Amino acid sequence: MDSKAAAYRVPITVSVMLASILQAIDTTIANVALPHIRGSLSATLDQMEWVLTSYIVASAIMTPLAGWLASQYGQKKVLAGSVAVFTLMSAMCGMAHSLAGIVLYRALQGIGGAALVPLSQAVLLDINPPERHGRATAVWAMGVLVGPIIGPTLGGWLTDNYSWRWVFYINIPFGILSLIGVLTFLREVPRRTAPFDFFGFASLSTGIGALQIMLDRGQLLDWFSSPEICIEAAVSALSFYLFTVHTFTARHPFVSLGLFRDRNFSLGSLFIFIIGVVLFATLALLPPMLQDLMDYPATTTGLVTSPRGIGAFITMAIVGRLIGRVDTRLLITAGLGVTALSLWVMCGFSLQMDERPVVWSGFLQGVGTGFAYVPIAAVAFVTLPAHFRNEGTAIFNLLRNVGSSIGISVMQVAFTRNTQIVHAALAAHVDRYREQLRWLTPYDPSTSHGVAALNALVTRQAQMVAYVDDFKALLLVTLAVIPLILILRTGRATAGTAAVVAE
């Protein structure tokens, strides 16, 4: 690492992290603005689903391509182009006056944003010597994890105080600063040209796209009772089958098999998939639980869930300095253990609790995620050859995103099904006490108002039980992967590619 690398390390880090934080925030910031966008554009609930789906699907399809593009055309060109497209499409989303327009611009925004997170990770690994990879990974992980956590709060504040259009306009100044920094300070690394495997990319992107659409629209369409969901599931399964067969038989497959011959990268990818499942499923479950069952307003919901981000931010700043001094496997074990403890606390949630269990469990989960995420991201690349770095970061982040989509969808399905089952069981028990309930005026089953009030009470109880069952399932998933840490191996980080500094 020469003096130029040290001189430009800080502005490069700021530039690439601005881009990755914007992309991470945009995965959740628009969610709270959807009702306002729907009213402004006179769209239906089903149509509004495409505002989110178009961004997620486009980003998922293009993420694995980021590594190949960077290897072929250089990190600087691809990163600068991605920032420019993302920023421009953010402006177009803010100016959109039709549903078709905002869906199109969101898809293009997803295409532009797909490369930002994986390439920012690759750049930070390239511009830092191996002994600083732990700290570099901690900086990168702060943006990737804290972004989605603060996204809903920031989106709600912008929407309430200004307009839903500012959810997108907020990206413009920071995107411009990031673009200027990338063009000014970043230098290209040596390229590794390879033929483009069109069939491999087409089959993988089709499989990912169909899977994402199925996961995003399944709950709305009642899953496999819908012909659309059945078709998407079949297309996804067939595409992944063709991609797998082709990858093992092609001379130059789109995804290099050498990536998964590295034990640490394979296990790190599995761990980050599980982190995606647990973290994002929890983030998706808590706001509706607090607002619908506990009657928390949106602002209060944001406040009581914010300690999760605080815990993650503080822990990542600490754990980055521990990597290299403490066995990485111990850090991951501690992180997953604290995450499991936070989920155990959530299993005790009830309708009678105050905000303290929510704050405490959220802070614990932030601490656990911070302790696990940074070492996982570091150990996944510690033995991976440097020429696989661009491709590896793309696949690594793709699996985290797929894990989050699967986790959210599966937990939502489990919540709906369990609510129905528990509601039926509670109703059967309540029916035994019809005579006694006549003395309780609000719940007198002989009147229509009493039946409605009684049904609402049973439904709330059933929903809380269903939420707790989801937290138990996530707890079991977290505990199940902890033994796999024993398979990880420690090793010296491979030498990075040439320093990415200014010309």
Image: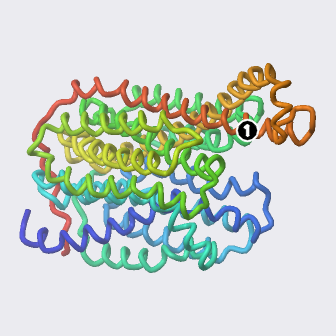
In the image, taking residue 453 as reference, residue 298 lies left or right, namely: left
Which secondary structure lies at badge 1? helix
User: Quadrant location of residue 89?
Assistant: bottom right
- In the rendered image, residue 169, in percent from the top left (x then y), is placed at 54, 76
Figure check: 126 above or below 406: below
Number of marks in picture: 1
Determine if residue 45 is in view: yes
Q: Quadrant of residue 166?
A: bottom right
Quadrant of the drawing holding the C terminus? bottom left
Could you tell me which quadrant the N terminus lies in? bottom left
Question: Where's residue 168, x and y in %?
Answer: 56, 72
The vertical placement of 390 against 263, above or below, is below
> Horizontal and vertical percent for residue 295?
64, 53
Query: Mark 1 — residue?
Result: 457
Looking at the image, is 151 positioned above or below residue 320? below
Give the camera-side residue of 385 and 49.
49
Name, please, the residue furthest toward the front: 439
User: Which quarter of the figure has residue 176?
Assistant: bottom left
Residue appearing at x 53%, y 31% in the figure: 240
> Is 252 on the left or on the right of 385, as rendered?
right
> Is residue 69 in view?
no
- Between 1 and 351, the residue placed more toward the observer is 351
- Image position of 480 (left or right of 207): left
Amino acid carrying mark 1 in the image: Leu
Q: Position of residue 419 (x, y in %)?
A: 68, 31
Residue drawn at (22%, 40%) of the image = 379
- Pick out the residue farthest to the right: 447
Residue at (61% x, 72% y) in the render: 159
Q: How is the image coloured?
A: rainbow
Q: Residues within 10 Å of mark 1 (few under 14, many from 20)?
A: few
**Front-lying residue, 248 or 267:** 267
